[in-house]
Image (cartoon, rainbow, N blue to C red):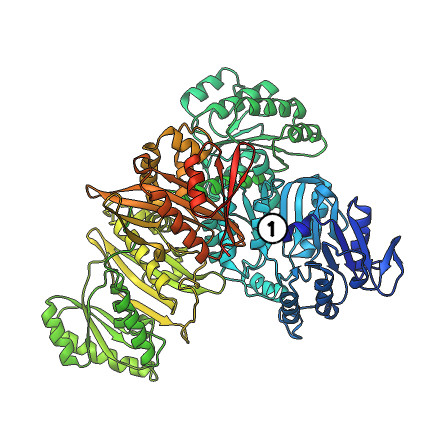
């Protein structure tokens, strides 16, 4: 696929079908941009109406061209495009950019044109960008295959836009502001090439350092998540997602022809992918500029240096309202400043130097803030003052930034003509400047949140068994089949409770009573206050029909409540099927929580956690996550709510056992992973107190029809841990039983121990150089992997009840399953015992099963053991300078 996209962005020749000289036509603008923009490749005009267009020969049809073009640009009515894809195939053109619109009407494929286009492209092997695309650009080679009026200068920002009109406006703005672009592409209706393909392409492009995306919806959430997670840690991905409001979502449906998912779920997905979400076009480029020019902050503590109090107050308001912190400078920093700043200065952060601030005042304050260990970034604000030289202060800012590396610096030069010279100095010194301080603060916070999200994603979670032994999947499947057999989609509460219990989630035992005598007998046996709840597969929210009574302490009261519940519900919901009333022991509740899930139309099952009880809809204290979860991700999900503060203990309230809660959330995620038939499920409330937690009420419903999935995890947008590749092997040469399994984030300590006990020579062969040490960041890269595009198998032995990794083999593939790269490391004590051969055979088996076409590897010439292994396994070896290359065909 990379070779395919190379033809889009670096074509040697282009044919414009529908080329014309008529002003206002796409075919005219596209030809003019290609011919006048400096593109050095061959440009063909195709239109049977003309002999020449804009001074170049015009051909009647594609088949008449003297050579097959790398790229075909269609700029003619929609109905003409699908039949012409056959001509593309016949002349050997495999890439087409479809500028034509009209394939979708009011968001739907009323005339079947979109379906016809997709079918024709698939039949003839033609890859498409579009339809309804503005086009694409690669400024570094002067390629402007759009009908937009302006092409920005070459730079390092790749911009993907689903809206052509917005793309044109942004390109015009970028050209005016001299913002450099590596690539621009308008994806339109995404009949073929989508945002995920382009993230993969730009992610491996050396010309691109940051990827900007404007999108209205996502059609392949799993591919998007995989691509974004693969590159977000090395290349920031900044996303402007439209359709966050109800009306905005409706507009998205009409404009892009796809349903916009729940906006809060998009937020959760972008966080999980490590992407940055912004709210405006201005934020998109403010954030990109800051990322390009400044290092990431270590935290969200900001110091502010200013010559005016008002702008600093506005900046502080935005900072605190968006979750940032005003840095508290150390006493020694403030003491040092008292001797050099004006007597009227503020004495604290924000550092208000007053309107009498000079260059040296700014320099001293800025230096103190940059050197203070309790600040993560500095914002310098300058307003027009008669005694302050804006350009001289800008020079001081640039100089101090160079003297203190590693801490980001932002500038707000307010005004216009008086500060223009200073802004020029800041630009030349790579200091991002903004006309207003609020924009600078927002850019800083986006960077801080990005850093925090990356740390969260690659945090080493506490260890948890790979496959929790007390999960009873067969029993859970039996519950689902029983509901299906009864012709229902809604589970009765007792069934929902049994389903939760199958996954080790604690539930308060409830006993079904069909008569008041049975209810009284159950109450007597329980011996204490009880709760009575109506049992019906048709009633989810029992409180809405007054179907719950709590704290019943006598048998007489139990009988009365039983009769009331049955009679009352029959009046309020005469159509509902009534099974009876459940009786359960009262539980001492300190906190009522909600744990639930629903299926988002874009991302599939999502997990909702927050404050529970009858007021949950009012308080709306919720956080959203995506399965799968580990204990670290579960903790971050809980910490995303306000109730988390109470769970940690507050004033007279003792702390709750949050570790148990994290475990419950992980188990709940397993349920969603294993049972794609579950459409909705909710525990409300999950009662938790100092002694533990228990589910007091549960409801669930199934998909109307059983899902037919080729992949058991097809319903998820993130590939979970691949348990199918866990295998035990009797290793005769050592007498040990080796456990071969995919690596997981919890393995970081074991991986660190493997590296620690490996010789310098072995590490030299593995990493092509001496490694002084491997830190958490590097270990996280090895252990936090996306199983959709990478696999690492560890060989584990049990020694004195402690597991030990003795070897690891991995393949890292491209997004298109064309090839994967192989690497291996075996502990020195296990060299020569066949462990490397065993691991290599296994990873080859996995690569074949995952559909890769070939495995490649690079190894040092002096690594003779590696050469012998490759030769035994049938690799073809090719010699290179300093290193040799091995390749194994899997087809």
- What is the count of numbered marks? 1
- Above or below: residue 228 compared with residue 603: above
The answer to whether 356 appears left or right of 62 in the picture is left
Which residue lies at the image location 89% right of the left edge and 57% below the top edge? 52
The answer to whether 693 appears left or right of 234 in the picture is left
Q: Judging from the image, what secondary structure is the residue with disc 1 in?
A: helix
Which residue lies at the image location 67% right of the left edge and 71% below the top edge? 113
> Residue 713 location in percent, x, y?
41, 62
> Residue 21 location in percent, x, y?
86, 58
| Res 765 quadrant in image | top left
Q: Which residue position is annotated with label 1?
A: 2
> Residue 846 location in percent, x, y?
42, 54
- Work out whether residue 770 or residue 582 is closer to the camera in this orientation and state it: 770
* Disc 1 residue crowd, few under 14, some 14–19, many 20+, Cα 10 Å: some
Residue most extreme to the top: 339
> Residue 155 location in percent, x, y?
66, 39
The answer to whether 152 appears left or right of 736 in the picture is right
- Above or below: residue 753 compared with residue 837: above
């Amino acid at each position: 696929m990379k070779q395919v996209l190379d033809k889009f962005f670096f074509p040697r020749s282009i044919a414009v079908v529908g080329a014309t000289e008529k002003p206002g036509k796409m075919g005219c603008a596209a030809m003019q941009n290609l011919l006048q923009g400096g593109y050095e490749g061959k440009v063909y005009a195709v239109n049977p109406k003309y002999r020449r267009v804009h001074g170049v020969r015009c051909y009647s049809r594609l088949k008449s061209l003297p050579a097959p073009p790398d790229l075909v640009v269609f700029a003619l009515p929609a109905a003409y495009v699908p039949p012409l894809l056959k001509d593309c195939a016949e002349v050997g053109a495999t890439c087409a950019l479809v500028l034509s619109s009209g394939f979708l009407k009011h968001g739907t494929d009323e005339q079947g044109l979109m379906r016809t286009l997709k079918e024709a492209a698939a039949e003839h092997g033609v890859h498409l960008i579009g339809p309804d695309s503005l086009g694409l650009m690669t400024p570094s080679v002067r390629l402007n295959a759009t009908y937009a009026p302006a092409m920005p200068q070459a730079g390092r920002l790749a911009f993907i836009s689903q809206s052509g009109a917005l793309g044109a406006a942004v390109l015009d703005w970028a050209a005016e502001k001299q913002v450099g672009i590596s690539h621009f592409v308008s994806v339109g209706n995404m009949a073929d090439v989508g945002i995920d393909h382009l993230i993969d392409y730009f992610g491996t492009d050396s010309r691109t350092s940051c990827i900007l995306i404007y999108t209205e919806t996502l059609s392949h959430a799993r591919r998007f998540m995989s691509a974004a997670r693969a590159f977000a840690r090395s290349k920031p991905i900044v996303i402007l997602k439209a359709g966050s409001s109800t009306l905005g979502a409706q507009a998205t449906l009409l404009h892009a022809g796809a349903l916009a998912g729940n906006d809060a779920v998009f937020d959760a997905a972008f966080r999980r992918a490590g992407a940055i979400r912004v709210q405006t076009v201005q934020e998109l480029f403010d954030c990109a500029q800051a990322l390009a020019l400044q290092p990431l902050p270590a935290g969200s503590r900001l110091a502010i240096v200013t010559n005016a109090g008002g702008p600093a107050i506005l900046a502080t308001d935005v900072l605190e309202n968006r979750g940032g912190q005003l840095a508290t400078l150390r006493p020694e920093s403030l003491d040092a400043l008292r001797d050099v700043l004006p007597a009227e200065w503020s004495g604290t952060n924000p550092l208000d130097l007053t309107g009498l601030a000079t260059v040296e005042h700014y320099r001293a304050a800025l230096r103190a803030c940059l050197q203070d260990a309790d600040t993560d970034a500095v914002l310098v604000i300058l307003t027009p003052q008669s005694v302050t030289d804006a350009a001289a202060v800008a020079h001081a800012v640039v100089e101090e930034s160079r003297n203190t590396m590693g801490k980001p610096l932002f500038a707000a030069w307010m005004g216009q003509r008086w500060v223009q010279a200073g802004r020029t100095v800041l630009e030349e010194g790579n200091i991002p400047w903004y006309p207003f301080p609020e924009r600078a603060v927002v850019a800083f916070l986006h960077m801080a949140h990005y850093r925090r999200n990356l740390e969260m994603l690659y945090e080493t979670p506490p260890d948890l068994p790979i496959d929790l032994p007390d999960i009873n999947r067969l029993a859970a499947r039996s519950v689902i089949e029983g509901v299906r057999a009864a012709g229902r989609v809604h589970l009765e509460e007792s069934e929902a409770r049994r389903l939760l219990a199958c996954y080790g989630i604690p539930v308060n035992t409830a006993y079904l009573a069909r008569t008041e005598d049975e209810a009284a007998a159950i109450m007597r046996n329980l011996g204490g206050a009880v709760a009575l709840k109506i049992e019906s597969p048709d009633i989810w929210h029992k409180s809405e029909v007054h179907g719950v009574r709590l704290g019943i302490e006598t048998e007489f009261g139990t009988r009365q409540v039983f009769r009331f519940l049955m009679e009352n519900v029959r009046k309020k919901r005469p159509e509902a099927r009534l099974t009876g009333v459940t009786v359960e022991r009262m539980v001492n509740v300190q906190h009522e929580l909600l744990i639930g899930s629903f299926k988002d139309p874009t991302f599939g099952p999502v997990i909702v956690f927050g404050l529970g009880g009858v007021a949950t809809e009012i308080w709306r204290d919720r956080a959203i996550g995506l399965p799968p979860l580990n204990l670290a991700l579960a903790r971050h999900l809980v910490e995303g709510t306000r109730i988390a503060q109470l769970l940690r203990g507050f004033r007279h309230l003792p702390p709750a056992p949050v570790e148990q809660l994290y475990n419950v959330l992980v188990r709940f995620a397993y349920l969603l992973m294993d049972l794609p038939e579950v459409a909705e499920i909710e525990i409300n409330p999950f009662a938790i107190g100092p002694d533990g937690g228990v589910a007091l009420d549960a409801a669930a419903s199934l998909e109307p029809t059983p899902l037919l999935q080729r992949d058991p995890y097809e319903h998820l947008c993130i590939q979970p841990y691949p348990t199918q590749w866990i295998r035990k092997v009797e290793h005769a040469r050592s007498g040990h039983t080796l456990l071969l399994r995919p690596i997981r984030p919890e393995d970081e300590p074991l991986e660190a121990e493997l590296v620690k006990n490996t010789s310098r020579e072995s590490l030299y062969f593995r990493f092509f150089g001496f490694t002084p040490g491997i830190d958490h960041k590097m270990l996280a890269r090895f252990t936090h992997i996306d199983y959709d595009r990478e696999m690492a198998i560890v060989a584990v032995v049990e020694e004195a009840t402690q597991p030990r990794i003795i070897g690891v083999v991995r393949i890292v593939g491209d997004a298109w399953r064309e090839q994967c790269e192989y690497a291996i490391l075996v502990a020195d004590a296990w060299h020569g015992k066949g462990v490397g051969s065993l691991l290599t055979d296994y990873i080859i088996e996995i690569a074949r099963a995952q559909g890769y076409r070939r495995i490649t590897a690079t190894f040092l010439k002096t690594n003779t053991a590696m050469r012998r292994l490759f030769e035994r396994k049938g690799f073809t070896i090719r010699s290179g300078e300093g290193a040799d290359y091995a390749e194994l065909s899997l087809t």
